[in-house]
Amino acid sequence: MRALVISGGGSKGAFAGGVAQYLIEERGRQYDMYLGTSTGSLLIPHLAVNKISKLHEMFTSVQQQDIFSVSPFVQRKKGDREYVSIDFVNSLWQFIRQKRTFGESKALKKAIKRNFTEEEYHQILNTKEDLVVTVVNLSTNTTEYKSIKEFTYEEFCQWIWISCNYVPFMSLVKVDGYEYADGGLGCVVPIREAIQRGATEVDAIILKSENLEGQKVLGKNPFSLMLSLFGHVMDQLEKHDILIGKLAAKNRGVTLNLYYTPTELTENSLIFSKRLMRKWWQQGYDHAKEKHEEKASRDIEL
């Protein structure tokens, strides 16, 4: 049974879309199971129904207002560089309203239901072994995996949304008395979960460079420093998930194919830029193609 796993990574999900497009359209990969965390959770329902052109349009045209109903960021441009700074007005307004997060992502919830239809939900149920999204239960301090088989269309759309909610910058959601947030806070790359669910071959797209190089620039104020620290924690979690996944694959004789980004792409994956995301999608496609061509060349030499 073949599984596709896509890690968290915010706007860098466009790169994963390009890799997946190459694997499905050019390599003819057919997956029985799909698992995603955060932005990976947004990608996998569309890949499961082979709506790649629709996914491309969605991921390369998204803007900040499609994600945030209350954005804690202001997107700015200086030369060729795009970056975000704090929206002090919105953040202050959240404090005044006694909210526990700097921003709200209800616009994303609406976008998920607008783009992922109930018909597609039933198509996945009828044709795929499983589709799973990762969330974190902050009330119990546990990571949970939500299968499409266990929920109605409305409920599963909510779990996809919750998987993407990078607190404290996005919405904190209460379900059945428990508070949930972004799955990346518990498991960034759910490779081991795919193996435990019966996968015998796993293609894992990891939205991080394999070799982290260069000196990072830390935030110049408490808010942006918090973003930098969160990024550091997520990097460490991701390394741990990959290591555990590799060990699980080795122990069970599972074929594991890893697709990293060739560079870091961006220091802030909460920037949603049409220009950058179109570029990253194409980079993902080209990188996967190059990786397979190099492998084929090595095989011929042997």
Image (spheres, grey):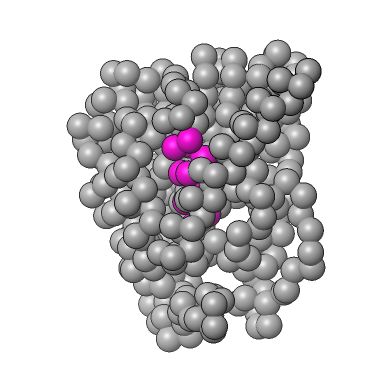
Q: Is residue 167 above or below residue 127?
A: below
Q: Position of residue 232 (x, y in %)?
A: 71, 59
> Of all residues shown, which one is farthest toward the front?
301
Q: What residue is rendered at 56% in x and 37% in y?
A: 289
Q: Main secondary structure of the magenta part?
A: helix
The C terminus lies in quadrant? top right
Q: Quadrant of residue 205?
A: top right
Q: Is residue 86 above or below residue 239?
A: below
> Of all residues shown, which one is farthest toward the left?
119
Q: Quadrant of residue 55?
A: top left
Identify which residue, 261 or 193, lies in the foreground: 261
Q: Position of residue 11 (x, y in %)?
A: 49, 57
Residue 274 visible within the image: yes
Residue 92 visible within the image: no
Magenta residue span: 11-22
Q: Give the mark count.
A: 0
Identify which residue, 167 or 99, lies in the foreground: 167
Q: What residue is rendered at 43% in x and 57% in y?
A: 278
Q: Position of residue 215 (x, y in %)?
A: 79, 68
Q: Position of residue 135 (x, y in %)?
A: 50, 42
Q: Is residue 96 above or below residue 136?
A: below
Q: What residue is rendered at 73% in x and 74% in y?
A: 217
Q: Is residue 19 left or right of residue 141?
A: left
Determine if the magenta segment contains residue 137.
Answer: no
